[in-house]
Amino acid sequence: MAALEPGPEPGPEPGSGDHDSAADRPENERELAVQFVGAFEGWSLITVACDHRPFWLLTEVAGVLGVEEPRRLVDALAERWAQSCPPNTTVVLNAGDRRDLLDKLDRAHVVLAQEDHRKPIMLLGPVAVDELCACFDSAVARRLRAHLRDQIVPEFHAWDRATRALEQPILSVDAATIAGNRLEFERRCFEAAVLERLLDRLEQPGFVDPERLAAHRVVASELALGGVLEDYQEVLAHGWLTPTQIAERWSGMTAMRVGTLIANLGLKGSRAHSRAFLNKARGHDRTVISHVYSPAAVGLIERELSGRGHRRCAQLDELDELDLTGSVT
């Protein structure tokens, strides 16, 4: 651990005993990364990850606190921690570690003052910054403490946990396949959701023809499924019926009258109980948009038809009776 006593070159802090000083550690031993390139109230505030812990540049913290000479912060910490320095509060980067951080700052397009390139770089951890905010008590210091505590530090640890999780090796080929399929599914769902939200916005003012909107909703469904809806007709056939198929089950009923009833029941365009798909128009060489309705919607439609005095086809009634007899036996 770096010392906080005043002087041209920080040495081991008093009473550190078991803690390593920066000079005792081999060059490039530390894991350094530029985690966040941010700002606080107009001042640059770079968050550096050092051995998976958040740190900030001494010079930048001094600028935020309105201290012209950064060395005053070091003197203040040395005075408050005269007997012993808490571990992992400050880090002084020399030689290889300093060059490593400067190189990473350069790749992150962070420009430091020229004097920072010629001398050791001191990093301050959360405890040190908190102590300095208490020492240089001001409105800006209190806001800085709250900003780091409530936003930067939680985001840092969340980012670090996610990074470490991604670095863990996948244990099996099956796990890799499952993960790949899951990512592909999430990507398709995201693309479909973006298209759906766009269509919802276009639908309100009536800028786009309803048939065109419905066709694009079919495209959104196909994006989410990763296939063409026509390939799922056999799956949809089990309990999902079109207005034409419902009309064929009732005497004297037409698909248009069923469609009117569907609209009156509020089922038209229902995302829970209707699905759109592209179909060939009867007697025409063109594609039209058809809809199928869920078993629950079909049951509601047929109960409404029965309540209005319509009768089911006799053949269907006989089939239903046969099904009931077979289930009893």
Image: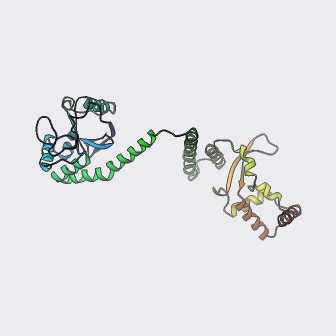
Residue 255 found in image quarter: bottom right
Can the viewer see residue 279 in this picture?
Answer: yes
Q: Is residue 230 left or right of residue 65?
A: right
- Which residue is at the front of the view, 180 or 222? 180
Asked if residue 263 is positioned above or below residue 38 in the image, the reply reads below
Which residue corresponds to the image point at 24% horizontal and 49% vertical from the top-left?
127
The residue furthest front is: 18
Which residue corresponds to the image point at 78% horizontal and 39% vertical from the top-left?
285
Residue 205 drawn at (x, y percent): 56, 52
Which residue corresponds to the image point at 75% horizontal and 54% vertical from the top-left?
238
Residue 6 found in image quarter: top left
Quarter containing the C terminus: bottom right
Residue 155 drawn at (x, y percent): 36, 48
Asked if residue 106 is positioned above or below residue 156 in the image, the reply reads above
- Which residue is at the front of the view, 327 or 221? 327
Residue 57 found in image quarter: top left
Residue 71 drawn at (x, y percent): 14, 40
Quarter containing the N terminus: top left
Can the viewer see residue 69 in this picture?
Answer: no
Residue 85 drawn at (x, y percent): 18, 47
Which residue corresponds to the image point at 64% horizontal and 44% vertical from the top-left?
222
Coloring basis for residues: rainbow
- Which residue is at the front of the view, 204 or 135? 135
* Numbered marks: total: 0
- Which residue is at the front of the view, 96 or 65? 96
Asked if residue 201 is positioned above or below residue 250 in the image, the reply reads above
